Amino acid sequence: MDNDLIVIAGAGGFIGGHLVNYFLEQGHVNIRAVDIKPFDEWYQVSEVAENVVLDLQDRTNCRMAVRGATEVYNLAADMGGMGFIENNKALCMLSVLINTHLLMECKDAGVARYFYASSACVYNADKQTSADVIPLREEDAYPAMPEDGYGWEKLFSERMCRHFREDFGIQTRVARFHNVYGPHGTWDGGREKAPAAVCRKIAAAIDSGDHDIEVWGTGEQTRSFMYIDDCVYGIDRIMHSDIEEPINLGSDELTTINGLVDLVADIAGITVQKQHLLDAPKGVNGRNSDNTRIQELLGWAPQVTLREGMRETFEWVQAEYRKSREASVIS
Ligand code: NAD
């Protein structure tokens, strides 16, 4: 129902901010957007939604956040790219408090449906040792050996969702995102992920004329990247399906990190020289999404090409980079 209250936790962040706008565009008028950050740090602030600043690790705050809601989307987590999650494992694990307290309060408030944003970081590391990947199927999460810290929290929280559904009847849905990218996300400061970091480095290279680009690791590690429009549409489809088990939500267009750099350089119209930092955090050697199940169950899978999505992303990051350069010159 368009009038039912939708709560989006983590709405000041990248995916949460886009999800608020997506539901508004779909005609939903009753949206509560919640995040721990002060409003001036939200990537997008809707003028229509009820915007609230709350720390959702706290159970009482979760009670306030979900009051009256029909659906709750949990996109809130203390997270970032590999540089952040490899060096902040305890902080990543503390996000378990957000999911736990939200679920407890959703149960008490009679919330009908609950979405949890999981990650490809739940997959067993032994399946990701080679750049020449076999795409990850949902069953590859077990036996469990996920990414330390961040991945363990995601896997545990997935199970918590499962048992709240089985024991208390709340309809939980879980998607395992594979590297989401697009405009209005983190692009500097240490929490940014590879696509935004590459865009920023190329914007800086154009600005400075120095075309040496630092790449973490050999750059031969393989990944797939999902554009944000596919992500929010996929969240909606999964939430309103009868898919009870965690499911991949990711692109299956595979690239190397070196290939990603070359693609963005090509979009920007420059040539670059890559400087490989072999000691920098680089994550697993190879990872791709097996989309057989989502195709089977939804007749759909993410479809925006990397080139299309990176063009939009580069334009946005370059504009942000230029704004911040101008601001630093003025101050
Ligand atoms: P993001 O960091 O941009 O957004 C997360 C938001 O959660 C932030 O705005 C942050 O302030 C908020 N938050 C953190 N702690 C909070 C708290 N205690 N109370 C309230 N809000 C809190 O990250 P994102 O890229 O939008 O990711 C959203 C979700 O998707 C996260 O759960 C993340 O783990 C998951 N995910 C993202 C990706 C990706 O590539 N972006 C991949 C896999 C999984």
Image (spheres, helix red, strand yellow):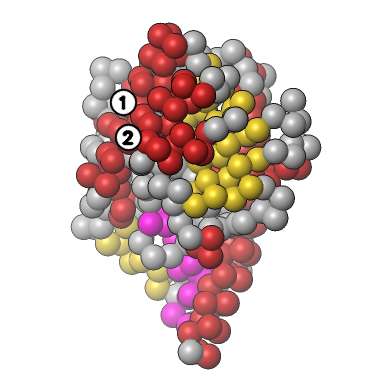
Q: Nearer the viewer, mark 2 or mark 1?
A: 2
Q: Which amino acid is tagged 2? A: Val
Residue 237: image quadrant is: top right
Query: Quick check: 167 above or below 41?
Result: above
Q: Residue at x 21, y 57 (%)?
A: 279
Residue 150 percent across, percent down from the top left: 30, 39
Q: Is residue 109 visible?
A: yes
Question: Farthest right residue?
Answer: 27
- Classify mark 1: helix, strand or loop: helix
Question: Farthest bottom residue?
Answer: 330
Who is closer to the viewer here, 305 or 258?
305
Asked if marks 2 and 1 touch (Cβ < 8 Å), the reply is yes
Left or right: residue 7 compared with residue 197: right
Any mark on residue 1, and which?
none
Query: Quick check: 62 above or below 319?
Result: above
Q: Residue at x 57, y 77 (%)?
A: 323
- Magenta span: 191-210
Left or right: residue 107 compared with residue 237: left
Any mark on residue 96, and which?
2
Residue 225 percent across, percent down from the top left: 51, 43
State the predominant SS element of the stretch in magenta.
Answer: helix
Residue 139: image quadrant is: top left
- Classify mark 2: helix, strand or loop: helix
Query: Quick check: 320 above or below 174?
Result: below
Residue 328 percent across, percent down from the top left: 48, 85
Characterize the local packing of mark 2: few (<14), some (14-19) or many (20 or more) Cα atoms within 10 angstroms. many
User: Is 204 in the magenta?
Assistant: yes
Q: Residue at x 38, y 51 (%)?
A: 80
Any mark on residue 156, and which?
1
User: Is 218 in the magenta?
Assistant: no
Q: Which amino acid is tagged 1? A: Phe
Who is closer to the viewer here, 270 or 69?
69
